[in-house]
Image (tube, coloured by chain):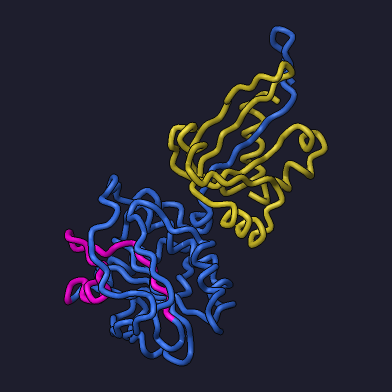
Amino acid sequence: MNELYRAIQSNKDLKNKIKLIGIGSGNSDFEVNFFRKKYEIPFPLFSDEDYSIHKTLGEVRTPYFIGVRLKSDGSSEVFYSKRGGFKDANKFLKMMVKLSGL
Amino acid sequence: MTRKNHIWMVGLLVIFVWIVAAYAQSPGFKENIYPVGKLKPRDSVLKVKVGDLAPDFTLPAVRGGEITLSQYRGRKNVVISFVPAAWTPVCSDQWPGYNIAKEYFDQSNAILLGITVDNIPTLYAWTNQMCMGGGTLWFPVLSDFYPHGAVAKKFGILRSDGVAERALFVIDKKGIIRYIDVHDINTRPRLEVLVGELQKLEK
């Protein structure tokens, strides 16, 4: 995930257009903060201690990625919603850009 | 950038949903977890209390040999984490969480002993999947399989269906029980509560 963040930040065309956030399903603030420090996570992480976000998302099995298009009128649209991680952050980023039409 | 009906796409948000403990697990691990559904939160009667000398026991360890609780007497504080069963949902997040939080145990000069009523081959397969890249858990995992659940029974946490409760016992260097949490079997104990209890102990 840190690699994905760095791939976004090092691309001048993408760094101000793609935001990455993490949601710790069933984790407390303490657990998420511990994780953030231990793995030096540079992007925002949120705890979802009571699984409320997890339930809203349809109780997805983790790890899970959701890609959202943010529009000029303030609306948003999900273009990617899939379980599973990735091995190559650059390939994943390219796929997200292609699928979103950014 | 695409344009539709004068509405522009201004950017993307990528949301990564995960569980802290699952970060370093083998990719296929979650595929093999058996869904147990919601269980009776607690189904046993404790036989020990805070301030008691912890009942001694000797159990076989997944990595070979045997471990006796009293071997840590005068040397280390001990956390015993009983979990109900291998390959079940909450248990499969709890120990990987402790695995990445080793420093909290070290800071309190504590060892963690993980115990289930499963046999050694099952525990071997299950715990091997908790660490990506062939790593192993830093703490001993013990099998309370035969006589079935005998140690869980000594502590009073063997459920009527033969699995252990999800229970934590913090035992100081003198062998005295300092904290007990027989947790709702359906939920994972919070790391910060255990860390708080560890910090109360003399190193």
Quadrant hosting residue B46: bottom left
Q: Is residue A52 above or below residue B179?
A: above
**In the displayed structure, does residue B103 sit left or right of residue B35?**
right
* Of residues A52 and B116, the one drawn nearer to the viewer in this rendering: A52
Q: Residue at x 25, y 73 (%)?
A: B47
Quadrant hosting residue A46: top right
Q: Is residue A33 above or below residue B57?
A: above
Q: Chain B, which colour? A: blue
Farthest top residue in view: B5
The span shown in magenta is B147-171
Q: Residue at x 28, y 84 (%)?
A: B57
Q: Is residue B109 above or below residue A53?
A: below
Is residue B157 in the magenta section? yes
Disc count in the image?
0
Percent position of residue B41, x then y: 29, 53
Q: Residue at x 33, y 79 (%)?
A: B61
**In the displayed structure, does residue B133 sit left or right of residue A21?**
left
Which quadrant does the N terminus of chain B fall into?
Answer: top right
Is residue B36 in the magenta section? no
Percent position of residue B114, x then y: 38, 71
Q: Residue at x 54, y 75 (%)?
A: B200
* Of residues B53 and B95, the one drawn nearer to the viewer in this rendering: B53
Which quadrant does the C terminus of chain B fall into?
Answer: bottom right
* Of residues A99 and B65, the one drawn nearer to the viewer in this rendering: B65
Percent position of residue B168, x then y: 39, 68
Farthest right residue in view: A12
Percent position of residue B150, x then y: 21, 75
| Chain in yellow (letter) | A
